[in-house]
Image (cartoon, rainbow, N blue to C red):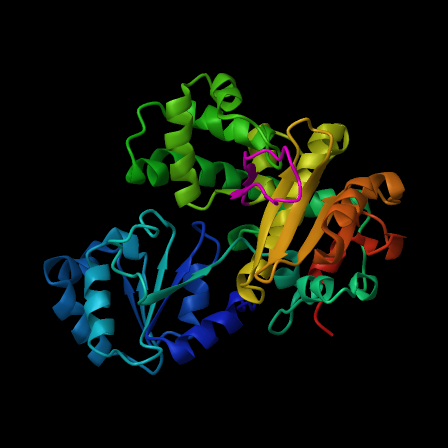
Amino acid sequence: MAYLPRLVDARLAAVLAAFPAALILGPRASGKTTTARQIAGDVVELDDPAQAAPFRADPTAALRMRLQRRAGPGPLLLDEWQAVPEVLGAVKRAVDQGLAAGSLVLTGSVRAGFTSVSWPGTGRVLQIVMYPMTVLEQRATAQPRNEFVDQLFAGGASELALPAELPDLVGYVDLAVASGFPPVLRLGEAESRAWLRSYLQQLVLRDVAELGEIRDPAGLNRLLRAIAEHSAGVVADTELAAAADINVKTVRRQERLLEDLRIVEALPAWHSNRISRLVKNRKRYLADPALAAVLLGVDSLAVMSDGGLLGRILETFALAQLRPLLGVDNLDVHAFHLRQQDYRREIDVILESADGRVVGIEIKATASAGSNDARHLAWLRDQLGPCFVAGVVLTSGRAVYPLGERITAVPIAALWAPET
């Protein structure tokens, strides 16, 4: 199958033009290796015991030799670096000794230890996060770009572009449960769900187990299902523990492992000195909404038959489209959620720029949003004043229209409208 350009392509090229080494990090089967191979001059598959053996024996010498004897122009790709973690020390030494820009690309599915001050890659390997494919990437014929976030911070929500074809609510749900993992893009519905079930089984039995001791795989399966049931929700660890029939300490330990594998993502709570009684709990999401559908044993019809589930799946889907845009072109914009302790007000997504400007986003399973859908955004606008740049209610409708001062209704599909 021909290579489908990814959002990270341009970012990867820019990093390698300026720095010696880049690390592409993301869930297993999200396309990291395929993307890296497009530019690699040579490849070492470190999950292959034969290729890994020299790097285990003498990582510094093995890396030096492979760099010197690359089969072609382009960086050396060290695929699945976590299989031989000793290689990071060799990478550190090579960079410290003056390794040229664009020499190395590493790929891996695990982020454990990256925040540690002792991690050898600190200040030497730039990280690029990759996710399952967005709709924008699946439909692009050239390098995918999208102006959604830039337009919002420029105050131009009313001018957001839309793709030529707009789905209705059923169409959005169909997209959500179809998955963005590249291996399933050409599969039928039954085959896709079989692949996703196998993926989850391997996740529990192998991937998580490689990071930490898993004494109760059935308990981890129950935890995954509980997270799927609460994807896009704020739920206490004690509730997850009760749902999974495991203790809270185990929930926290196993969830960290799932986050290290990038299967579970979280939005931290947003805080402001201007607003009181904001909760501190983060909001959890599965990285791909189709994983939630498979874990819950539901299809599009079942999602459409349950209003609560519909809202959670749709929000998980919208975040799966938005999150990669922030990680590529808008590195100084960070995502949060807002909820007050009395549950009187909540906003699905808060985007905040480095200079303190704020965009609020609500995601609604409605084709026709009204002032009631925007009331929490209007409240936030009034609290923040000029710092509030824009509010958007993402809908399943087909039109962009105002809902109040600096607040606009916008179809979800604006998240994958190609850059004009």
Q: For the view shown, which residue lies furthest in the front direction?
A: 273
Q: Residue at x 52, y 73 (%)?
A: 10
Q: Is residue 297 above or below residue 395?
A: above
The residue nearer to you, when weighing 265 against 224, is 265
State whether residue 261 appears in this view.
Answer: yes
In what quadrant of the picture does the C terminus appear? bottom right
Query: Which residues, given as a range, are shown in magenta?
Result: 266-287
Q: Is residue 363 above or below residue 312?
A: below
Q: Is residue 96 left or right of residue 347?
A: left
Q: Is residue 285 magenta?
A: yes
- Give percent across and percent down for residue 242: 50, 17
Q: Is residue 112 above or below residue 223?
A: below
State whether residue 365 appears in this view.
Answer: no
- Give percent across and percent down for residue 371: 88, 43
- Give percent across and percent down for residue 223: 47, 27
Q: Residue at x 58, y 59 (%)?
A: 326
Q: Residue at x 64, y 53 (%)?
A: 351
The residue nearer to you, when weighing 335 against 215, is 335
- Give percent across and percent down for residue 290: 60, 41
Mark count: 0
Q: Is residue 362 left or right of residue 366?
A: left
Q: For the view shown, which residue lies furthest in the bottom direction?
A: 73
Q: Is residue 76 left or right of residue 263?
A: left
Majority secondary structure of magenta residues: loop
Q: Is residue 344 magenta?
A: no
Q: Residue at x 57, y 28 (%)?
A: 235
The residue nearer to you, when weighing 270 against 320, is 270
In which image quadrant can residue 189 be found?
A: top right
